[in-house]
Amino acid sequence: MSLKAVVSGCGAYLPERVLTNQDLARQVDTSDEWIRERTGIRQRHIAADEEKTSDLAVEAAKAALTASGYGPDDIDLIIVATTTPDLTFPATAAIVQAKLGVENGAAFDIQAVCTGFVYALSVAEKFLTYGQHKRALIIGAETFSRILDWEDRATCVLFGDGAGAFVLEAQDEKVADGRGVVASYLRCDGRLADLLYVDGGVSTTGEAGRVRMQGNRVFREAVTRISEAMESVSEIAGIDVSSIDWFVPHQANERIIQGVVKKLALRPNQVISTIAEQGNTSAASIPLAYAVGVADGRIKPGDLVMLEAMGGGLTWGAALLYA
Ligand code: UT7
């Protein structure tokens, strides 16, 4: 019996509080015009003081469970991709498991910063198609606002908070009927860690630290590495990039997304973009955008979807799936 990992539901959660570019321009030396022209961002959501990453993750997971028609008892694997865990340990996935009332299987976090959701999807797909687990919740969740330096205009204008989730389940190939994850491609080059990192941590400063980024150097790496990942995953799958129905990129910068669209000769109307309303939500941005595409009827069952991301590490990767 050959198994496929099929997305049977997705969900999203954004905190209520919205921070606009105009709000930011009152706090640091920036402008709505600069942020929109350089990044495409108009606003971002910020978690309330009492809201933790696990709370955002739980809301997105509940929405994904509802969409899939499954309940907590049907889940036997939870993977949370996050850079902003509630605690150093236990894993945020363990906290989410308890809050959801899931009592079976395994739960752990994945740390690949903005590429975290692609890493999580790839790992979950292996667990499911190997037959070790039956039904997974994979969640990208971030309270990135907590690790921003709110005096550094070069980074604080870029990021936001949120969570997105997939229910991913093992299905017999015949039942899946063409749906499911086709291939994924993951990479890391740790020599480039100092381009984008946090200047603290448990075994260094003992504090969480703040985001530091050489933005223009990361920007220069982005289009090349993302395009390479998309071409590689297409080659692994034996599918031409031109066959993609929808492109759901990590939402870091509208100019990066458009650069990739141009390089790979995609059509601008194939892109699901949420960057204007949500900013860069790190590991949450792909499932958040995917959920928008499903909710507004663009992504339909059977459509071929390309996911990609690049982030701290540097890490980067791509995945292809039939919705
Ligand atoms: O998700 C993880 C991956 N992250 C990314 O992919 C982010 C990649 N990088 C980027 O998106 C862009 O590099 C940024 C949006 C961060 C910056 O855009 P840029 O066009 O690369 O600008 P820059 O860093 O080269 O800075 C240009 C100018 C500088 O001023 P001078 O030196 O030319 O006088 C900056 O100080 O813009 C200035 N600047 C700002 N001005 C107003 C930087 N941030 C701001 C700001 N408001 N918020």
Image: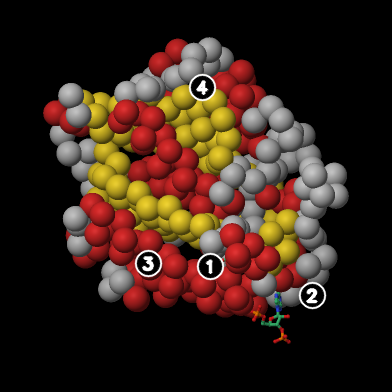
| Residue at the spot of label 2 | 29
Pair 1/4: label in front: 4
Q: Nearer the viewer, residue 266 or 277?
A: 266
Ligand 1 lies under 8 Å from the Cβ of mark 1: yes
How far across and how far down the image is residue 66, in percent? 42, 25
Mark sitting on residue 253: 1
Point 30% across, 30% down: residue:
129
Q: Could you tell me the amino acid type at mark 2?
A: Asp
Q: Position of residue 285 (x, y in %)?
A: 51, 51
In whole angstroms, how far apart are the C-alphas of marks 2 and 3?
Answer: 36 Å
* Mark 2 CB lies closer than 8 A to ligand 1: yes
Query: Of residues 41 and 307, which is closer to you in this image?
Result: 307
Amino acid under disc 1: Asn
Crowd rating for badge 4 (residues with CA inside 10 Å; few <14, some 14–19, many 20+): some
Q: Nearer the viewer, residue 69 or 87?
A: 87
Q: Which residue is mark 4?
A: 106
- Measure the C-alpha gap from mark 3 to mark 4: 33 Å
Q: Give the quarter the ligand 1 occupies.
A: bottom right
Of the two numbered discs 3 and 1 in the rendering, the one whose residue sits closer to the viewer? 3
The residue that label 3 is drawn on is: 228
